[in-house]
Image (cartoon, helix red, strand yellow):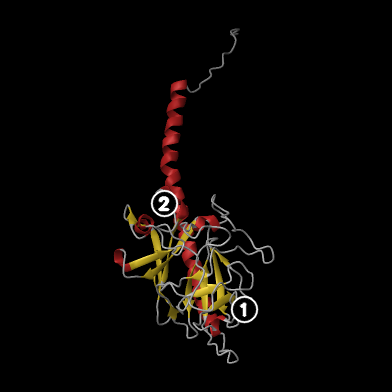
């Protein structure tokens, strides 16, 4: 009988082997995580595109759901999708009884303009948090003759369902513009003449560049002075009430844009424009490693239908 005690043989990683395994894991994670993140981000972009594709016909349907108000000589102007810095799509409809800060009907001013209000029986749609959107407008300057506007901006349809869009002329008399009660005080910031208040509200300097991140609850820059939710409605306030109308939207990943050291702050040193900087504009409209940095959605001027994605 063998009386020698049984000896257990224990195998284990040496320190060198353990370090090699950990190094391999780190390398693999470094390769996989960016790929997965990009894949998920692209999935959010497609989700946002699908949401916009559903929202457009809904807004067009409401565009024909109104009549002229003969009592004040107002003409019904249709409906719109309003894109906000909080990644919302709001359905808004022409309110012919909208009043200025002076208590006058916007439609009856010496230079009539179009006030809009929320469609009461439609909830806001929400885009994924990491998705960014800018409005596309045609212009005489810039590469390709395009302007890119940071939110808020609107896709507007007339009562016949056609697209109404164009570059702002800088006057309240431009009937392509959507006026919206951004701070929910029941008044629209339009004077009796052709003036309007495009500067940001609530104590911000009118000479400061506009940055929508200050009005985006998901951003570390939120809230800007005066941003936040209205106490009575619970709705997020908007920075101004003069909203450009555009011919399309570009959808992209906010994190990818920020990874380039870029943002959606307006170019120059004025709050009277929401055009993004040239560097941001160029990145949104270009490709990275053969992949477009954004998904472009354009709308037909005649029918309001989506022409191209």
Kindly tell me whether residue 294 is visible in this rendering: yes
Mark closest to the chain's N terminus, 1 or 2: 1
Picture coordinates of residue 174, whole percent (x, y): 45, 78
Sort mark 1 into few (<14), some (14-19) or many (20+) by Cα contacts within 10 Å: few
Q: Which mark is residue 103?
A: 1
Image: 72 above or below 271: below
Question: Of residues 69 and 52, which is closer to you in this image?
Answer: 69
Q: Is residue 272 left or right of residue 109?
A: left
In percent of the image, x 41 and y 51: which residue is there?
A: 262
Image: 289 above or below 78: above
Q: Which mark is residue 262?
A: 2
In percent of the image, x 54 and y 69: which residue is there?
A: 241
Picture quarter containing residue 266?
bottom left
Rendered-image quadrant of the N terminus: top right
Q: Secondary structure at mark 2?
A: loop
Image: 107 above or below 252: below
Picture coordinates of residue 239, whole percent (x, y): 54, 63
Question: Of residues 201 and 49, which is closer to you in this image?
Answer: 201
Question: Of residues 85 and 277, which is closer to you in this image?
Answer: 277
């Amino acid at each position: 009988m063998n009386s020698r005690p049984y000896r257990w043989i224990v195998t284990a990683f040496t320190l060198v082997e353990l370090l090699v395994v950990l190094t391999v894991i780190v390398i693999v994670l470094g390769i996989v995580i960016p790929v997965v993140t990009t894949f998920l981000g692209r999935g959010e972009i497609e989700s946002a595109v699908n949401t916009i594709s559903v929202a457009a016909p809904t807004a067009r349907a409401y565009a024909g759901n109104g009549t002229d108000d003969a009592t004040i000589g107002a003409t019904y102007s249709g409906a719109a999708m309003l894109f906000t810095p909080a990644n919302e799509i709001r359905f808004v409809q022409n309110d012919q009884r909208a009043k200025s800060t002076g208590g006058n009907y916007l439609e009856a001013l010496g230079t009539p303009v179009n006030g809009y209000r929320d469609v009461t029986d439609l909830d806001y749609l929400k885009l994924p948090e990491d998705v960014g959107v800018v409005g596309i407008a045609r212009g005489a300057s810039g590469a390709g003759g395009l302007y890119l506007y940071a939110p808020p901006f609107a896709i507007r349809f007339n009562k016949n369902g056609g697209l109404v869009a164009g570059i702002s002329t800088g006057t309240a008399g431009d009937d392509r513009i959507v006026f919206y009660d951004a701070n929910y005080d029941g008044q629209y910031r339009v004077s009796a003449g052709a003036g309007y208040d495009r500067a940001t509200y609530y104590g911000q300097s009118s000479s400061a560049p506009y940055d929508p991140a200050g009005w985006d609850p998901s951003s570390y820059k939120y809230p800007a002075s005066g941003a936040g939710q209205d106490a009575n409605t619970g709705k997020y306030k908007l920075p101004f009430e003069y909203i450009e109308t555009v011919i399309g939207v570009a959808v992209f990943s906010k994190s990818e844009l920020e990874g380039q050291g870029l943002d959606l702050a307006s170019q120059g040193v004025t709050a009277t424009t929401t055009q993004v900087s040239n560097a941001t504009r160029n990145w949104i409209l270009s490709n990275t490693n053969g992949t477009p940095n954004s998904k472009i959605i354009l709308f037909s001027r005649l029918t309001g239908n989506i022409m191209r994605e």
